[in-house]
């Protein structure tokens, strides 16, 4: 079907009817098959087609006469079809379309494979423009499956070309929807419709930042005159997206400021006493963060704060202080964490740290409910919570279900937020009987690079804990190539003999899909079992080894963790389930199998599981093969102990995809990639700020406002 399209477009009689909002179904020659594929790309209207941007370009701009064509070259040339025929090759079961093309300087063979219909697309005597790679058959050079374009006049203006003889756009497509077809569709639409779209960017900004106007940019991004022009066009669209993203974020902040929250007075004596009674001294950063939080809670509008601190920096105690102050003022706190094990750990920590204050602290997970450390019925706990009789409720997702209601919920604490999702607050609020919105404290050990805190996390205020508690020793990190493995095992043996404990993390395995399409992590379980058997039988038969994986029953997981925590197990072999938050001071070695398969940030997280006690700790990256690139990547971790620097590195290496997680909000990839560019991000943010400051309703920028509203609608639908 594809490739059959005529080179000239036959939309003429439809132009009168076409609008930006015209659905693709009404575009001539777009049949049900193509419609389906376009819809899969999110293209529903003519306008969507215009905004479907190429992700790269094929450079076919080297146009030369036939006589100058050489082997192994990407070239463009034009000529007359002197001969054309289909040949069947029975051995390889395919059709060869063979043509001879000539111009005034010479002749060249052209071969297309498996496109027999071409013989009907053009005939002897037609003029063709061709672009593609040359190849050799015997001593003869031929053009192999080139892109082609029939031209009516050999002397045509080259800028009229679409598929050949220029920089040709290549579109992100789905199977069976070629870039050729998309170009065929998009180009005539673009020619007629680009005048219909008004430029949303204010003139001053375009002048100030030397941005192309819309009409030029939209043409240049699809059919650029040069790669530089394409880049300039792209910058213009990215800048616009960044402005809209910034407007959105700043607006969200303003909206939040207008909401009401319970104002929680600071009980200075209480918090000072709490700090004094801790078995350690708070670090300056912890103190500063606590104060920022308490000051926020004091205000009658919702706090929106992100507490960022490297693994082991002591975020929990900061949140406990906030929860204590909240409880003593007569309000409730919810604390959500992503895993059962973590919830239990936090429950334990809170119970100990707040013991003296006789608070009612509850625990809710899918499996278990506790109050004052005793097992209770879920129904009881829910009833008490709804009456405001539980001060602090700690739990997993089980917390955000319909039946969970609160009497006086004032503070929501979320641990490891990009796993949990910040939007959960909205769900908690639905159940609130008062008209207030709870304060939000979101905690993460994954440092977020500055460009992201300004943009997609820009609605949150930041508290940073940069320093680790005093007395922590630097973790010694080593890369262990296959040959050094035995030495590493000996080292681990020594450590255990000294009374330490060891984590072994198994390689990451992509979940396989089972028949019903659901992801299973069966392979991961298998990998853990194998590693466990290997260590137990072959390497460390003298030690107590346990394993942990996501498929185990929760009780079993708890039992194993507890045993490890109590020092009854020497080695814990595990999948990445122990990734977040687990606190075991006596563990001094973190060995990561297949370290090359993890991202830097995640490796850093694993490493943070050790080094919490008084002893020197070690992190071993065991790799299966030795390679320069692997080593270079891992070495970044040896040099870099600071998660913040690492985040910037990860951003450069991998882009913001992982960090943005569910906060991607359908922002185009192009813009996500631009989030690496701090300068542009800052410029856009400052301009957005200025726009809102001078004109909060955006009356002077109605087009930009419409775009902002579209963006808001998109997000609220998600
Ligand atoms: P994270 O920030 O990774 O959540 P935790 O809150 O789990 O870290 O704290 C890690 C460990 O450090 C805990 O055992 C905690 O009791 C301890 N800790 C917290 N603050 C301090 C401090 N100022 N001095 C010493 N130890 C601390
Ligand atoms: Mg933590």
Image: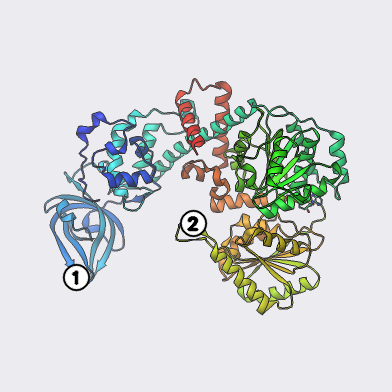
Q: Nearer the viewer, residue 518 or 136?
A: 518
Per the rendering, the mark at residue 518 is 2
Distance in Å between CA atoms under marks 1 and 2: 43 Å
SS class, disc 1: loop
Residue sitting at x 87%, y 35%: 269
Per the rendering, the mark at residue 530 is none
Residue sitting at x 60%, y 48%: 419
Q: Nearer the viewer, residue 581 or 448?
A: 581
Q: Tell me, yes or no, if residue 575 can be seen here.
A: yes
Q: Nearer the viewer, residue 285 or 142?
A: 285
Q: How many marks overall?
A: 2
Q: Residue 625's x, y, as percent?
A: 56, 71
SS class, disc 2: loop
Residue sitting at x 84%, y 46%: 355
Q: Residue 614's x, y, as percent?
A: 82, 60
544 sits to left or right of 182? right
Per the rendering, the mark at residue 90 is 1
Q: Residue 178's x, y, as percent?
A: 31, 50
């Amino acid at each position: 079907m594809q490739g059959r399209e005529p080179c000239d477009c036959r939309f003429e009689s439809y132009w009168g009817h076409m609008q930006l909002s015209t659905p693709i179904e009404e575009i001539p020659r777009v049949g049900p098959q193509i419609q389906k594929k376009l819809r899969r790309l999110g293209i529903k209207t003519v306008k969507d087609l215009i905004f479907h941007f190429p992700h790269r370009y094929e450079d076919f701009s080297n146009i030369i006469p036939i006589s100058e064509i050489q082997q192994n070259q990407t070239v463009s040339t034009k000529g007359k079809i002197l001969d054309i025929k289909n040949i069947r090759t029975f051995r390889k079961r395919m059709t060869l379309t063979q043509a001879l093309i000539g111009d005034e300087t010479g002749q060249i063979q052209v071969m297309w494979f498996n496109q027999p219909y071409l013989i009907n697309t053009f005939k002897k005597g037609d003029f063709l423009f061709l672009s593609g790679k040359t190849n050799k058959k015997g001593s003869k050079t031929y053009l192999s499956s080139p892109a082609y374009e029939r031209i009516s006049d050999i002397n045509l203006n080259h800028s009229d070309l679409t598929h050949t003889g220029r920089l040709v756009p290549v579109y992100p497509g789905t199977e069976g929807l070629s870039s050729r077809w998309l170009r065929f569709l998009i180009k005539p639409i673009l020619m007629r419709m680009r005048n219909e779209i008004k430029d949303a960017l204010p003139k001053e900004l375009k002048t100030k930042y030397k941005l192309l106007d819309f009409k030029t940019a939209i043409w240049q991004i699809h059919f650029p005159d040069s790669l530089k022009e394409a880049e300039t066009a792209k910058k213009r669209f990215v800048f616009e997206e960044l402005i809209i993203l910034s407007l959105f974020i700043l607006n969200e902040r303003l909206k939040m400021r207008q909401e009401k929250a319970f104002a929680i007075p600071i009980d200075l004596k209480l918090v000072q006493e709490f700090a004094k009674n801790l078995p350690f001294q708070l670090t300056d950063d912890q103190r500063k963060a606590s104060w920022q939080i308490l000051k926020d809670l004091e205000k009658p509008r919702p706090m929106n704060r992100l507490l960022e601190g490297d693994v082991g920096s002591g975020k929990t105690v900061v949140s406990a202080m906030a929860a204590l102050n909240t409880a003593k003022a007569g309000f409730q706190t919810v604390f959500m964490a992503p895993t059962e094990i973590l919830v239990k750990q936090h429950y334990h920590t809170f119970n100990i740290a707040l013991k003296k204050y006789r608070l009612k602290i509850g625990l809710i997970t899918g499996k278990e409910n506790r109050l004052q450390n005793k097992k209770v019925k879920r129904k009881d706990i829910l009833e008490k919570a709804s009456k405001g009789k539980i001060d602090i409720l700690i739990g997993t997702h089980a917390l955000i279900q319909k039946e969970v209601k609160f009497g006086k919920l004032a503070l929501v604490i979320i641990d490891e937020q990009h796993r949990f999702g910040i939007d959960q607050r909205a769900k908690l609020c639905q159940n609130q009987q008062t008209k207030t919105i709870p304060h939000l404290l979101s905690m993460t050990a994954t440092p977020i690079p500055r460009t992201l805190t300004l943009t997609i996390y820009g609605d949150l205020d930041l508290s940073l804990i940069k320093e680790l508690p005093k007395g922590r020793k630097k973790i010694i990190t080593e890369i262990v190539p296959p040959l050094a493995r035995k030495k590493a095992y000996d080292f681990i043996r020594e450590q255990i003999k000294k009374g330490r404990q060891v984590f072994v993390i198994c390689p990451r395995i992509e979940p396989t899909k089972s028949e019903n399409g659901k992801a299973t992590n069966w392979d991961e379980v298998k990998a853990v079992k194998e590693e466990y058997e290997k260590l137990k039988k072959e390497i460390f038969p003298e030690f107590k080894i346990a394993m942990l994986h996501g498929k185990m029953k929760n009780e079993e997981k708890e039992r194993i963790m507890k045993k490890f925590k109590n020092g009854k197990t020497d080695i814990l072999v595990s999948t990445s389930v122990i990734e977040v938050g687990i606190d075991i001071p006596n563990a001094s070695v973190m060995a990561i199998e297949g370290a090359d398969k993890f991202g830097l940030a995640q490796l850093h997280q694993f490493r943070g599981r050790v080094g919490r006690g008084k002893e020197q700790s070690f992190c071993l990256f065991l790799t299966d093969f030795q390679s320069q690139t692997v080593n270079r990547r891992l070495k970044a971790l040896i040099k870099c102990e600071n998660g913040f620097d690492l985040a910037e590195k990860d951003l450069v290496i991998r882009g913001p995809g992982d960090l943005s997680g569910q906060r991607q909000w359908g922002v185009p990839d192009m813009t996500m990639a631009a989030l690496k560019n701090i300068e542009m991000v800052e410029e856009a943010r400052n301009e957005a700020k200025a726009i809102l400051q001078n004109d909060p309703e955006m009356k002077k920028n109605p087009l930009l406002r419409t775009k902002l509203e579209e963006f808001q609608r998109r997000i609220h639908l998600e």
